[in-house]
Amino acid sequence: MQQATATTPVEVSVAPKWSTDDKLRASPVLVTHHFQSLTEAQKLALLPLATVSLSFLYQELVNNRLWRVDFDRGGYNVAGKPRVRSLATRHLRAPATDGWNVVYGAMELAHAWAYREADMPEIVDDDFDLPKAIRLRLAVCLSVAWKFERQLASHFPRRFYDDQPNLLSPHTYEMAYIGYAFMTEEERAAFGGWREANLENVRQLYWDMVAMEVSLLASTNTMTLLTQNQQVQAEGRIQALFDDAILSADEAMAIRSLVPFFVVASQDGISERPRAGELVCAAMLCLRVDETHRVANVEECEIVMRSVFTPRERDAARVLLHRGRFPPPIASSTLRLGCYNDHEWGNYRYVYNPTIEKAYAMAESLVP
């Protein structure tokens, strides 16, 4: 991949090719869908495909510094103090941890708005390529989620001038770029490329996506979807455990960094999406079985886990840990994109398979 410059856009593709074995094991390729009305089950079937697309593009934009995800201290920098919050930076800097809840927020918006019965073919093709209309709406969801969280942290190059002098130009047409990045190579070629000579098409795509953004904002409860979703609620549960002195600050941030791992691992296209307490319970078990974070003994650990999580949450956490050991094909591809597949990542030991196996064993002992 090329480094983004003022003249070279990030050329990304969000339609990864899957192996034959992956295709055979993933349901969409073998099932004829009529999508006369998109049910919750049909949306769940599309969720892994949407997640891998959103995750890939988000990480590419962050890694190429077009979007900045630093955890700034805010206010004036005091001499001798680091510019960023060190604890959050250490645990959540990797974009796969979704420290600003952008990807999860985009998933929520997509679940509520992006899928249309009229756009779905009867058979989802072997390349797992979502229809273009849905991919463009995913781009709108990602853009809205990003602007909600980090609207002042975009660094797109300004390349496109108006025909007449204008104090607002040159423009970035950022949202159009995101839509362009969601296109296939063939669609980009037909579009004419991301270049000044193709300004009319770039401008038209931008305004088309602005219209879609208005539709999203007007037809969904955007604030609730972005501020009260399960990943945000998981942060609230972690905060409560910290306030009760059950977790240290370092443990709390480490657990938060693992929550997206279990969000993705749970996506088999069939199962319900996990709830906040279930995600926190699974992540906390991974920490507590690790030697550096174990409490005095196993019995004490089990007492703590039983006291702060309900039987349903502990049972669901056991299922999540099983999925963490054996993630479904598309979920596995998503997890391979970032830090959860990086041995150098500071918290990799918590998602290392032997650790998850130990956590699963403890989860079994916690099931009523």
Image (spheres, helix red, strand yellow):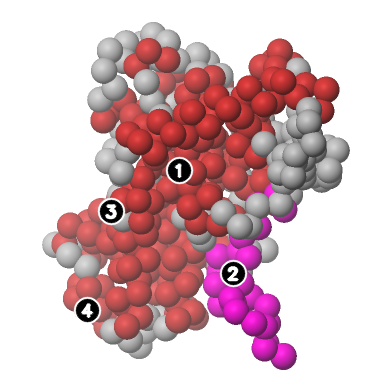
Name the foreground residue: 344 vs 55.
55
The C terminus sits in image quarter: bottom left
- Circle 4: residue type: Ile
Taking the magenta stretch, the answer to whether it contains residue 95 is no
Q: CA distance from mark 4 to mark 3?
A: 22 Å
The residue range painted magenta reads 65-93
Q: Residues within 10 Å of mark 4 (few under 14, many from 20)?
A: few
Query: Percent position (x, y) of residue 260?
Result: 45, 54
- To which residue does mark 2 refer? 71
For residue 303, which numbered disc appears in the image? Answer: 4
Q: Evaluate if marks 4 and 2 touch, with contact meaning CB atoms under 8 Å apart.
A: no
- To which residue does mark 1 refer? 106
Q: Residues within 10 Å of mark 3 (few under 14, many from 20)?
A: some
The N terminus sits in image quarter: top right
Element under disc 4: helix
Element under disc 3: loop
Name the foreground residue: 177 vs 16.
177
In which image quadrant can residue 159 be found?
top right
